[in-house]
Amino acid sequence: MKSYGLKDLMNFGDDEFDLSKVDFTAELLSCVPRHAALHYRVLPVFQNPDGALGVAFSGPPDLDMLDGLTHLLKRQIHLRAANAQALDGLIRRLYGPDAGRGR
């Protein structure tokens, strides 16, 4: 697996990823278990043929989050910055009504 440094995280881009264009299929959502989506506040947004997974997040880039997801999911992770409000709403809608409430 590729290792990431702070430089990689700082080069993720200034544009927010458009979550409205993602087809959140059951297969895609199964790539990130509910507990991981809630803990790291992320959503899977694409899966490459090579197995790499695109993950939407909000807030500043976080090496601990990236390392934790890479270790848990055992695949390369590509971070995509997203609007915090849109991301939180989708996490609640897609992972269940208790998502984001600490349950």
Image: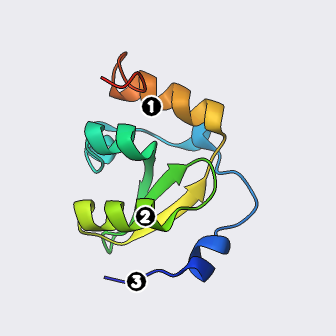
70 relative to 40, above or below? below
Left of 43 or right of it: where is 32? left
Left of 63 or right of it: where is 50? left
The residue singled out by tag 2 in the image is 64
Coloring applied to the structure = rainbow
Q: Residues within 10 Å of mark 2 (few under 14, many from 20)?
A: few
13 relative to 58, above or below? below
Lower position in the chain sequence, tag 1 or tag 2: 2
Which residue is at 46% across, 40% downward?
A: 23
The residue singled out by tag 1 in the image is 91
Q: How far apart are the alpha carbons under marks 3 and 1? A: 27 Å
Would you say the residues marked 1 and 2 are in contact, meaning their CB atoms lie under 8 Å apart? no
- 10 or 12, nearer to the observer: 10
The x and y percentages for residue 49 are 34, 70
Residue furthest to the top in view is: 97
The x and y percentages for residue 29 are 32, 42
